[in-house]
Amino acid sequence: MATQDYWAEAPLDRERVPLFARTLDATIAEDDSVRLFDEVLNSVDWSVWEAEFGERGRGQPPIHPRHLAAAILYGLYRGLRSSRKLEEACCYRMDFIWLLEGRRPDHSTLAKFRTRFREPLKDLFRQLGRIALTLGLVRLGEVAFDGTRVKANNSRFKTRTAKTLEAKLQALDALFEHLLAESESLDTEQVGSGSSTRLPEELAAVEQRRKRLRQALDQVRAADEARRQHGVNPEKNPAQIPTTDPDSRVLPNKEGGYAPNYTPVATTDGHRGFIVDCDVTADANEGPQAAKSVDRIEETFGQKPEKFLTDAGNTSGQIQAAMEEREVEFYAPVESSQPQPGNPACRDDPTRAVPSEQWPQLPRNPQGQLDKSCFVYDAEHDLYYCPQGHALPFEKELPDKRGGERVTKRTYRCPDCGGCPLAGACISKQNQRGRTITRDEYEEVRERTAARMATESGRQLYTQRPRIAETPFGLLKRVMGLRQFLLRGLEKVKTEWRWACTAFNLGKLVRELARLRAELTELAVAG
């Protein structure tokens, strides 16, 4: 059996007073990442944050915003999001104690700080991005845009339709009238003596609930109207409004089912994976944020990205036209509506018919009819040619609504479908006026994008999109635990998302600096 002197002695005796006290700095290893973390934050200009503080009043002097921001950002970097967890870490974890130099902010201070400095946080995000740009870690050669789904701070069961909200509001109205009448009958003497005309506490609480219900009812009625405009009957499929966080929307979850969610978006640089822009929308479709993201990137870095990659859900003509206006090359899965090589309709003379033995190879649409790609557009004469060589002249213009925007749709109709041997494969039996082809104002933009995607370089570049765009979301959710927002309301959620993206970039910058320094040290030793 081992004797007592067999075991290692404790480095520090709890009761003994050391002759030479150990410094706080000695508790952190020289190569610990928290040192680089602190070094980067020390190099940042905090004057925008300092300007938010007014004249110093009574009480204890405030903690400098750099230290509170460092606690939040380093906490996110280490997977700590809760203000109470951060408070605990600032008291007991040596890396946090070292970073804050022994300061111990409580959870309420950290929670208030996290939501207060919305604009200064944007400035910090910008400064870190420009540091990365200066070091060559951000190049803006190609960027990838994508969105994800993050749950709102709202139970999936705490949602209401317009019908249930109306019933609840009627019940509250009746309760308010009852309490008001009761209050007037009991307090006539106080009112007569000139007492305060403010509502009693119980009545004020009911009135506040009525106000929130009216706001929620207005929102759900607007959502029902939007559904009606998109062809959905709100009587059979009504919209639901979350009652805890009304700014969120009931959307499908990635893991299945529906719940109140937000849609955070991020644009990531392709060189080293830094997030160059971030935002949050309450809508299911993040497409309208694409062009705005390019504008924000130019504002942040002083230059626009050269190439913009996104997925198939963001390929509307409006987005593609917006990218061309900004002189940014757009890459997304867009197919040409014109006949391509391998399609029998792709022929030198579109006025000549496709040979009958090639008719089975003509592409079909989901309805089983000849696809639009079987028809050749003649830009000079503004008409289409069908596989039989018949002309489809322009007939009329019709307004259409896509993605919340009005577009003009041009219709072309064939007058020679009667007796055509391909009529059975081209038009339905109910069609008595001939085959029609529609073309909107963005058709030429789509053709240019499709031609770009058809090149070998375009295909090779687009294979990088999943790696660039989806990696940050995986790290933010898996490492930082950002699967549900802690805050409520769209503006606060946007701030919470920016904190996370800023921490992501700061952590990446720390790792890149460590790598660069290691490479320089290796070169110096080799030299």
Image (cartoon, grey):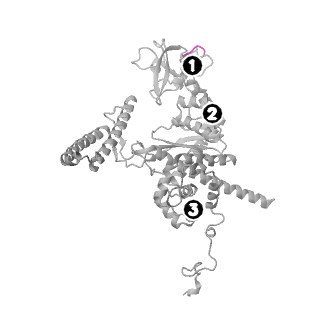
Q: State the residue lying farthest toward the front.
A: 193
Quarter location, residue 514: bottom right
Q: Residue type at mark 3? A: Leu
Q: Is residue 14 visible?
A: yes
Residue ID for mark 2:
329
Q: Which residue range is magenta in the image?
A: 380-384
Pointer 1: what residue?
A: 377
Q: Residue 402 placed where, x, y %? A: 47, 28
The first of marks 3 and 1 along the sequence is: 3
In this view, the mark in front (2 or 1)? 2
Q: Quadrant of residue 165?
A: top left
For the image, the number of numbered tags is: 3
Magenta segment's dominant SS is: loop
Residue contact at pointers 2 and 1, CB within 8 angstroms: no
- Estimate how packed mark 1 is, as few (under 14), some (14 to 19) or many (20 or more) residues with alpha carbons within 10 Å: many
Q: Is 123 placed left or right of 223 in the picture?
A: right
The residue pinned by badge 3 equals: 100
Q: Dot 2, how many residues are within 10 Å of its Cα: few (below 14), some (14-19), or many (20+)? A: some
Q: Nearer the viewer, residue 288 or 180?
A: 180
Residue 180 x, y percent position in the rendering: 23, 44
Q: Earlier in the sequence, mark 2 or mark 1?
A: 2
The amino acid marked with disc number 2 is Glu
